[in-house]
Amino acid sequence: MASTPLAGRTPKPASSAPAGGPRLRVRWDRVSVLVALLAVLATVIIHAGVVAVRDILGTTGPTPAGTQGAAVPAASPQHQPQPKPEAGPVCPRPGRDVIRTAPVINGQAGGPERTVALTFDDGPGPSTSEVLDVLQQNGVQATFFVVGEKAAAEPAMLQRMVAAGHVLGDHTWSHHIPSAKAGWNARTLTREIQHTRRAIVKATGREPCLFRPPGGIVKGAQKVSRAAGLSVILWSVDTRDWAAPANKKFAAVIQKRAATGLEQEHPVILFHDGGGNRTATVAALAGIINDYRSHGYRFVTLDEPR
């Protein structure tokens, strides 16, 4: 029996929408594309940030290990030392002769100037920092022949020397002094030189090119040092500061001995910043610098071309 619609009502067409109202149809293909684009954008932004940070760090450079907190006194404006350029990876070919004079430097007029090289042995030691202070205050650069085992224990001090423009030389690892008659054992000296070289390179990144045999004992040293690429350096003026008591009163004696080099054109003066208390050496140093400067000498380091 057919149903009869109620009076006053119009029948509605059947609807395909489910009960409860219309629902949003999600286009998952478009959502996937949008997510991929956002991921690419995030990757680009992160990469740009990493590059910016890396450029900043590359400009400032890392602080060398062991140098944080090391106070370096400012030099007086009139004697501000200029840092030396980075040394090359290869030392000049060593000569066959022992060097006892400072390098000859031509002046502005073209002729050679009187030059003097200040050298310090047996450090680093308790007085090294004070020696560096005096040198910096007077705008002078020197050559330090370091003992390997001490250098290995104080890399920050070696870094300070290099940063101030000073030159480092090899003074063996243990500072053992053989008898003048017997001279050096080649195998032992080779080992001592190489151990010290590694300590210097590890601390500073610089290759030493100079060697000073402890006690000034040359016998047996030249062949070994040349094989290691090192020039043998001695001195022309011995202040004998190593024998001075730990007393500032002996500064006058050291200064008087150093002044004997004023009779030479290119003296190399021997001091010590290690191996004992060097109070007298530190006290004498500024006066010695003034003596040579007032006589027209130019202070040089022993790595200068000859």
Image (spheres, helix red, strand yellow):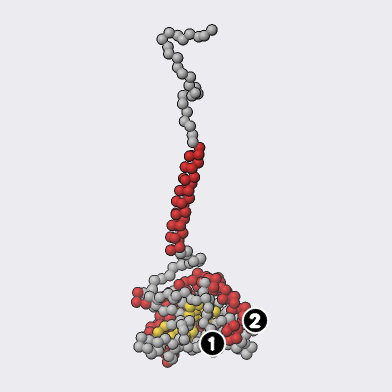
Q: Which residue sits at x=44%, y=68%?
A: 71
Check the picture and name the quadrant holding the N terminus: top right
Give the vertical position of 106 relative to 128 (above or below): below
Q: Which residue sits at x=51%, y=65%?
A: 65
Q: Which residue sits at x=50%, y=37%?
A: 28
Q: Amino acid at mark 2?
A: Arg
Give the mark nearest the N terminus, 1 or 2: 1
Q: Is residue 286 visible?
A: yes
Secondary structure of residue under mark 2: helix
Front disc: 1 or 2: 1
Residue 247 picture location, percent across and down: 47, 80
Could you tell me if the residues under marks 1 and 2 are in contact, i.e. CB atoms within 8 Å? Answer: no
Q: Which residue is mark 2?
A: 187
Q: Amino acid at mark 1?
A: Gly
Q: Which residue is mark 1?
A: 95
Secondary structure of residue under mark 1: loop
Q: Is residue 134 visible?
A: no
Residue 274 picture location, percent across and down: 52, 77
Q: Nearer the viewer, residue 148 or 272?
A: 148
Give the vertical position of 295 relative to 139 (above or below): below
Q: Which residue sits at x=64%, y=84%?
A: 185
In the displayed structure image, the side of residue 189 where residue 52 appears, left or right: left
Residue 268 picture location, percent across and down: 47, 86
Q: Residues within 10 Å of mark 1 (few under 14, many from 20)?
A: few
Residue 267 picture location, percent across and down: 45, 88
In the displayed structure image, the side of residue 214 where residue 117 appears, left or right: left
